[in-house]
Image: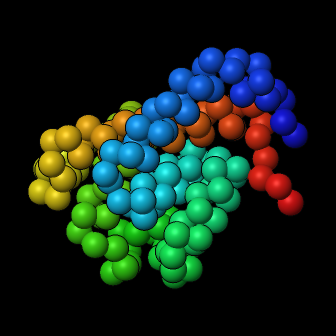
Amino acid sequence: MQRLDFAKASPAAYKALLGVENYVRESGLEHSLLELVKLRASQINGCGYCVDMHARDARAAGESERRLYAVAVWRETPFFSPRERAALAWTEALTRLSGQPALDADYAALKEHFSEREMVDLGLAISAINSWNRLAVGFGLQPAA
């Protein structure tokens, strides 16, 4: 049950976060990669609304069912490119900040596949989805039945 409509309660805050989202969308990072990142962070954060939305968005953009099902276990499958794997590892590292002994290794892998600007833009995308997740979970946003 939705506790609060955060967009209506604070339109300026919603608009600010939407501005970050729009920047990320126009950053040049692949749309398919961004959807995988958003889906993985949302899975980790237990955000049913965002998992539903980003799975649908990825599917509409041409993502395969097989890869969508495998995002939660991406390390155990051969379905993702080295660039996607680096982005998914970085997503997990930044989403689960406490107890990150492998942060240096994840960063090294990221640096192999992304430019410095792309690394910052990806970090911003991960920060944005974590913010959306926290608002959606905290205020009880639910996917439509």
Q: Point out the residue furthest to the front here.
A: 26
Residue drawn at (84%, 36%), measured in percent from left and top? Answer: 2
Q: How is the image coloured?
A: rainbow
> Can residue 89 be seen?
no
Relative height, residue 96 to residue 70 (above, below): above
Picture quarter with the C terminus: bottom right
Rendered residue at 63%/17% (across/down): 12
Direction from residue 93 to residue 1 in the image, left or right: right
On the image, the x and y values in percent for residue 86 come to 26, 58
Out of 95 and 118, give the one closest to the viewer.
118
Res 43 → quadrant: bottom right
> For residue 78, which quarter of the picture?
bottom left
Q: Position of residue 37 (x, y in %)?
A: 43, 54
Q: Position of residue 120 (x, y in %)?
A: 26, 38
Position of 26 with respect to 104 (left or right) is: right
Is the residue 144 above or below the residue 20 in the image?
below
Q: Nearer the viewer, residue 99 or 27?
A: 27
Q: Residue at x 57, y 45 (%)?
A: 45
Q: Quadrant of the N terminus?
A: top right
Q: Above or below — where is 12 with respect to 68? A: above
The percent position of residue 31, horizontal first and vertical second, equals 42, 59
